[in-house]
Structure formats: C-alpha cells, structure tokens
Amino acid sequence: MTPKTFSTEELTSLKTKMKLWASELGFSMIGIADTELSQAETRLIQWLADGRHGDMHYMAKHGDRRTKPAAIQPGTVRVVSVRMDYLPDSAAPPTTILQDSTKGYVSRYALGRDYHRLIRRRLQKLADLMSEAVGPFRYRAFVDSGPVMEKPLAVKAGLGWLGKHTNLIDKDSGSFFFLGELYTDLPLPLDKEQTDHCGDCSRCMTACPTGAIDKAYQLDARRCIAYLTIELKGSIPEAIRPLIGNRIFGCDDCQLVCPWIRFSKSVSTPDFQPRHSLDNATLASLFSWSESEFNTRLEGSPIRRIGYQRWLRNIAVALGNSSRTTEVLVVLEGKKAVASPMVREHIEWAIARLNDRAAEVD
C-alpha cells in the first residue's frame, strides 16, 4: 500500500480530532513522537551488557529492532502514544496494607482486570476513527507487547518525563497510568517533550525496599520486587526474601513516595476496581486457594499469567515475613503436598524463619 500524501493542514486537523477522540475513548493523554531512539538504544545496550535485566532474555532477543519501530512495522514514521490512568478509587489505601503484615500487597495496576485487551480495543477504535477520517493507512497497535520502547517513546510524545525510578511521571497526573502505542505511517505533527522535574529529589531511590534503584534513572531488575514476584520463574534469592515484606505481586513503593503522586487521579473505571478483595485480603486466605480457585478467581487478571506455583511462592515468602500464628503455620504445612519442589523450598524457608524469629522473642 503506497502511503497517501497529506497536506500539513490535513495532518494538523487530524491530530486535533485524535486528541478529542482519545479523550472520548477514556485516554487521559495522547501525544505524537518520531522514531529516533538512538539515546534509548545506547542505554538499553549498556543495561543488557551489565546483566541488569536478569532472566528477562526477551529484552535482548530482538536486537536493535526494539529501538527501530520501522523494523517492526514497515513504513512507520510516527508513534501515537497514549496514557490511561488506572489508580482504582475503591481500593484500600496502599500504605495501610503495606503496614499490615497479615495482608498481601498487590500492585495497584493488577487489582482489577487485565489492561492489555481494554487498551488495545480502544486503540483499535482510535485507528478506526482515523481511517474514517483520512482513509486506509498502515498501523500496528501495542500495549506492553512486542519489542517496543514504550517509555522513551512516551517521553518523546510529551506524555511525561522519565523519573529516577524509571517510571514515567506527568506533573499533572503523577505516574499511575498505563501506556499504549500506535505505530503509523502518517507523518503527524510532533509533540514537545516535558521538562524533567525530579530535581535533587531521591525519595524513590531510598524508599526501594531492596535497593534496586542503585543509580538515578537506572534499575537493577535482579533486585526489583516487581521482577522477583512477576518475571522470575525460579527461586527468589534467599537474602532478598526478608526485604520483600508482604508484597506478593509487584511493588509500588517508589511511586508511592514520589512528591508528584499527589496529582495522581483515581478512576472509577469498573475494570480497574479490585476483584476478590485483592486490595485487602489476608495472606492466609490467599494462600489457601486451590489451583482451581486461583484459575477461576483470577481469570482475566494480569496475575494469572505467573501461574499457581509462583503465586504460592510469593505468598510463602510474605507469610515468612509475617507473624507466627497457628493459622499461618497450618496453611504453610497444608500446601507442601501440592507445591512444586521450588515452592516447597520457599514454604520450608518461611516456617524456619517464623520459628527462628519466635525463638528470638522468647
């Protein structure tokens, strides 16, 4: 398909309409970026060379295609980047849960339904509206999928700046939002980047429970709780387990201490509201779920992709960091028979840790 030629006026008009459509579709912001990612590529190469990606081998799998959008979608000259706020307005306060060792903390983005399909459907509707306005064009939608540098592209599109915790921050919306992209061959007018407003602040770095943000604007995934509880398939390093606390899926600490969080907007979007009391559930009750209950209750949830055994692994660690009670010991012992060898090792660690701590008190 040969790209159609558009005048500057036509493209400017289309972009104006796109901003209106994006708002109507529930996106909190939309911006346009070019495809030049040489600086991001340099940082990525060094990050991979340092081994800071851990077992996320897919980060190196696609070579330089990750930083060259046209290599993924031929003809791409612009990237339409969108943001969608997700902080659920009905969820229990995160700090309240983090301070209660009997509860399990789930990252705010994972309390409701999986965001991938929801945002992808809305991106498709946006593309359909664009097609109706200007005719057929080449595009491809991405939502945390494929070899896409979504954060650097969002920065170039003016959706925010990259904070020292490596999350995107917007001065009017904080950082609790999802990102999505449309790679397109339409040469739309570009947006301007935002200014970095982190200044001398380093709260996110000092607040990280495991010290994963050891350098400003850099993250060592091997120590990141989000990586350890979601991406890591094997055993969680024993030395790090006590630092995980009661975080059983992801971690929001670096965002929660950021001064710009005061501008984060909570949403009433039904799909993002907590399901099955995941915002306020006890570790013992969650650990008691059978594999069938796990699959049924978490159907359509981003949590389900880690599988039942890693779910048990994460909660076992959190239980080991909680208080030694009869209920806790009973649920831990009760899962040994159905747990994999890897999970059983975490259960035994948790029981030993609880007994050792109880002995210290006595």
Image (cartoon, rainbow, N blue to C red):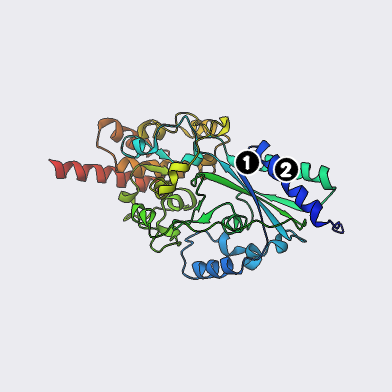
Answer yes or no: is residue 250 visible: no
Q: Quadrant of residue 268?
A: top right
Vertical order, 312 against 293 (above or below)? below
Q: Nearer the viewer, residue 40 or 142?
A: 40
Relative to 312, 101 lies left or right: left
The residue positioned farthest toward the left in the image shown = 362
Residue with the mark numbered 2: 126
Q: Residues within 10 Å of mark 2 (few under 14, many from 20)?
A: some
Q: What is the three-letter code of the residue carrying label 1?
A: Phe
The residue lying at 62 percent from left, 67 percent from top is 63
Vertical order, 358 against 218 (above or below)? above
Relative to 56, 246 lies left or right: left
Count of numbered circles in the view: 2
- Mark 2 / mark 1, whichever is N-terminal: 1
Q: Residues within 10 Å of mark 1 (few under 14, many from 20)?
A: many
The residue lying at 72 percent from left, 46 percent from top is 16
Answer yes or no: is residue 53 visible: yes
Q: Give residue 326's position: percent from left, percent from top.
A: 26, 31
Secondary structure beneath dot 2 equals helix
Relative to 9, 23 lies left or right: left
Image quadrant where one finds the C terminus: top left
CB under 8 Å between callouts 2 and 1? yes
Image quadrant where one finds the N terminus: bottom right
Q: Quadrant of residue 314?
A: top left
Q: Give residue 359's position: percent from left, percent from top.
A: 16, 43
Residue with the mark numbered 1: 27
Q: CA distance from mark 2 to mark 1?
A: 10 Å
Secondary structure beneath dot 1 equals loop
The residue lying at 67 percent from left, 65 percent from top is 68
The residue positioned farthest toward the front in the image shown = 9
Q: What is the three-letter code of the residue carrying label 2?
A: Leu
